[in-house]
């Protein structure tokens, strides 16, 4: 805008100069002033097609309250460079409902933007609305740029050993049986099969053998002593969600390190489906947890009012008040971060 205003003043001055000092020189000056935008545009057009923006991150995964540096670098021809480059920088974190946009202009070959991870979740970084101006800032050309990067902000692991002792993960109050694998507990039958050499005689099902006229053997079931369900419920307050995610992530990580299998369950409102994922390996859980942090908050994926929980020996739910075991709050105290 400033360049166009200045150019208009030059045209006005050249026109007055030509009117009051009519001559060959004043005419050439007036014509030159009129053709300046066209000449500047043609020279800038070369740089427009040969100039590109490259966006990079120094880290793709950081923890809460850490910093990440975004570098936007321009690569252009040195013979006919563009006059000015401006762009819009979008910072979008759906989980915490943060949407920020800011305009930047290149004053050097690179621009560095420092991001402070104030909340957990996946941050989408996008460069868009890129404008290339000529040398006199008279004409701007828009160039499409849909470069998108992702920055994952993980919650810190908390020291919850004292809470874990209250959770009593090694409960044996209820015994459940694996429907897919046989075991040595004959109080529940897994299957009945034909007799094979080496089978114990006390495992023969005599009544069924007499009916079928073949020896049939009972197979026992495999007990499952620890079948744990983890759920959590987010709020619409980003600070509370950071606390909830820290407690949940710390609890799930502890179970993985102790090699205690557990399920994570949530409901998708749009389809009314209950989704269940089972974990025992830390690598598998960490991959899934990062995927979970990309869920937008407004879709409200996570719920505590899940209907089918009867086959779980323990249900641990995390909300803004802490960790509850089977509906009883036991983990609401402030915990210190792991060193």
Image: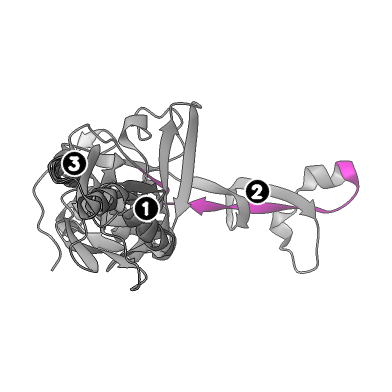
Alpha carbon of mark 2 to alpha carbon of mark 1: how far? 34 Å
Which quadrant of the view contains residue 174? Answer: top left
Element type at marker 1? helix
Q: Earlier in the sequence, mark 3 or mark 2?
A: 3
Q: Residues within 10 Å of mark 1 (few under 14, many from 20)?
A: some
Q: Residues within 10 Å of mark 2 (few under 14, many from 20)?
A: many
**Mark positioned earlier in the residue sequence (1 or 3):** 3
Query: Circle 2 — which element?
Result: strand
Instruction: Please give the name of the residue rendered at 64% of the width and 46% of the height, measured from the top-left corner.
Output: 189
Find residue 245 and report its horizontal and vertical position in percent: 25, 47
Q: Which of labels 1 and 3 is toward the front?
A: 3
Q: Nearer the viewer, residue 226 or 103?
A: 103
Q: Which residues are magenta?
A: 211-230
- Residue 15 disc label: 3
Residue 131 visible? The answer is no
Give the mark nearest the N terminus, 2 or 1: 2
Q: Is residue 133 above or below residue 273?
A: below
Label 3: few (<14), some (14–19) or many (≥20) C-alpha neighbours in 10 Å? some
Q: Nearer the viewer, residue 255 or 215?
A: 255
Disc marking residue 153: none
- Residue indicated by mark 1: 289
Q: Does residue 215 show up magenta in the picture?
A: yes
Q: Quadrant of the C terminus?
A: bottom left
Front residue of 328 and 148: 148
At x 18% / y 47%, what residue is drawn? 3
Residue that badge 2 annotates: 190
Q: Residue furthest front?
A: 23
Q: Main secondary structure of the magenta part?
A: strand
């Amino acid at each position: 805008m400033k360049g166009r205003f200045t150019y208009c003043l030059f045209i006005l001055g050249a026109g007055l100069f030509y009117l009051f000092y009519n001559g060959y020189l004043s005419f050439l000056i007036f014509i030159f002033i009129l053709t300046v935008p066209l000449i500047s545009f043609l020279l800038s057009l070369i740089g427009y097609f040969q100039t590109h923006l490259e966006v990079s991150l120094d880290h793709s995964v950081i923890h809460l309250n850490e910093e990440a540096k975004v570098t936007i670098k321009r690569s252009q021809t040195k013979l006919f460079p563009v006059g000015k480059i401006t762009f819009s920088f979008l910072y979008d974190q759906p989980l915490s409902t943060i949407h920020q946009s800011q305009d930047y202009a290149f004053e050097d070959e690179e621009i560095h933007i420092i991001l402070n991870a104030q909340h957990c979740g996946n941050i989408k970084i996008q460069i868009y609305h890129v404008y290339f101006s000529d040398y006199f800032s008279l004409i701007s050309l828009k160039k499409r740029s849909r470069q998108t990067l992702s920055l994952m902000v993980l919650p810190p692991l908390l020291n919850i050993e004292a809470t874990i002792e209250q959770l009593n993960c090694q409960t044996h109050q209820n015994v459940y049986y694996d429907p897919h694998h046989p075991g040595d507990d004959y109080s529940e039958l897994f299957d009945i099969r034909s007799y094979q050499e080496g089978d114990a005689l006390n495992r023969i099902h005599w009544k069924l053998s007499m009916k079928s006229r073949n020896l049939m053997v009972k197979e026992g079931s495999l007990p499952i002593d620890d079948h744990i369900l983890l759920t959590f419920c987010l709020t619409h307050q980003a600070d509370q969600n950071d606390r909830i995610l820290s407690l949940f992530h710390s609890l799930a990580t502890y179970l993985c390190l102790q090699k205690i299998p557990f399920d994570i369950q949530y409901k998708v409102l749009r389809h009314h489906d209950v989704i269940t994922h089972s974990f025992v390996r830390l690598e598998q859980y960490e991959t899934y947890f990062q995927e979970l942090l990309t869920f937008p908050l407004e879709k409200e994926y996570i719920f505590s009012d899940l209907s089918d929980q009867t086959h779980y020996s323990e249900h641990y739910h995390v909300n803004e008040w802490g960790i509850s075991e089977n509906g009883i709050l036991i983990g609401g105290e402030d915990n210190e971060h792991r060193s």
